[in-house]
Amino acid sequence: MNSKKSTLRPMMKIKEMVPYLKGKNIAFNIATEKNAEDYLRNNNNYYNIMAYKNNFQKYQCGKLKGKYIDLEFAYLKDLSIIDYRVRIILFKMIIDIEHYLKIRILNIIEDLDNEDGYNIVNLYLDHDYNNEKQPKKVHESIRKKVTDEYYKKIFSKYDIDGDSKIENIPIWEFLEIITFGELINFFDFFTKKYNLNDRKYIFILREVNKLRNAVAHNSCVLSDLNRKDNNHRPDTLVINYLKQCGIGKENRTTKLKNSRIRQMTYTLYLFNKIVTSEGVKNNVRNEITNLFYGRINLNKKYYNNNDLLKSIYEYFDKIIERNYKENLE
């Protein structure tokens, strides 16, 4: 028998999960043990729902050392539902950011005298083709996409099947075939080439893209919110934004050291900077207001003793109050 395989931890069955969680001092006074088993079987898996446990404290000494303080299974379930709702809104916002960034690029190019909508794309594809670190990365990405019937119809007129350099794709078609990450790289190249003021958004966009990848793959965004895993200096634009929201230096510093909080903050900042449709903005404001002051507050008593989650709520409350909140009356 393979020695490595023999040491693998066996898969825990649903009927074994509740006793295991009780052993971690997770209680079932609100959601019963039967409710928990049904939820784990039909609505969410053990790995996902347990991702939120790190937002709660453990005993540091005594006979309960290492076990959770004041943690109910219902709290984890509530956070998983809130997380799902948050991801839906964030994904919508990021898709809008991507769409309106493309419009912004097209409008800028229209105002540049020495741009015809082909030149900048050819320059970028030439740069990609001859890139020393990752040559032809965008070329390969485009070639993979044109196997799709939709893209094949649009791009059949370009030399995409071969290995030669792709040329003369107009900007309005090029923007539709590249990924969000590639769009940001192109925007970086474009703003650098023409020394545009919009370069100030590049690092913010890269953080937004990290969040996009997480929500697109249904990764939890409200887990490990106490982790300090980002020590890079926050973007000055966002620092000033948070100052305007009445968030003090210590609070800004602490919150933005958490990567997920930083990514969500950057998304909230950039959405109103990039999106130009008031209708789209109003729709998002309505959804954020109803989620933040409605569903998230539904079981707020669960978190009366959780200083971390209360502090994070108050942080985002200041941002939303100033930039997104609608009158609920």
Image (spheres, rainbow, N blue to C red):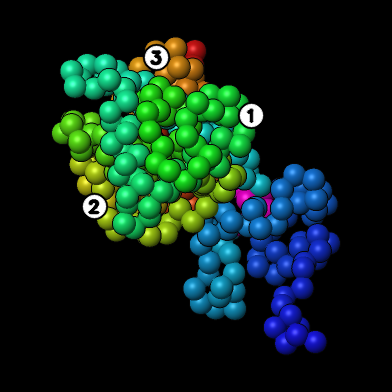
Q: Position of residue 262 (x, y in %)?
A: 36, 46
- Relative to 120, is 268 on the left or the right? right
Q: What range is drawn magenta here?
A: 71-76
Q: Work out whether residue 4 or residue 59 is closer to the camera in this orientation and state it.
A: 4
Mark 3 and mark 1: span between their CA atoms?
Answer: 31 Å
Q: What's the residue at 55%, 42% (across, down)?
A: 144
Residue where numbered disc 1 is placed: 149
Q: Nearer the viewer, residue 8 or 36?
A: 8
From the image, which quarter does the N terminus lie in?
bottom right
For the point 50% across and 26% down, which residue is it?
Answer: 157
Disc 3 vs disc 1: Cβ atoms closer than 8 Å? Answer: no
Q: Element under label 1? A: helix
> Which amino acid, by three-letter code, is at mark 1?
Glu
- SS for callout 2: loop
Decide if residue 41 is on the left or right side of residue 148. right
Task: For marks 3 and 1, give the one nearer the viewer.
Answer: 1
Q: Of callouts 3 and 1, which one flags the residue occurring earlier in the amino acid sequence?
A: 1
Between 137 and 96, the one nearer to me in the picture: 137
Indicate which disc, 2 or 3, sits on the residue closer to the N terminus.
2
For label 3, the crowd category at 10 Å Cα-Cα, with few meaning under 14, some 14 to 19 and many 20 or more, is: few
Find the distance from the CA under tag 2 to the CA under tag 3. 31 Å
Of the residues shown, which amino acid type is indicated by label 2?
Arg
Q: Which mark is residue 233?
A: 2
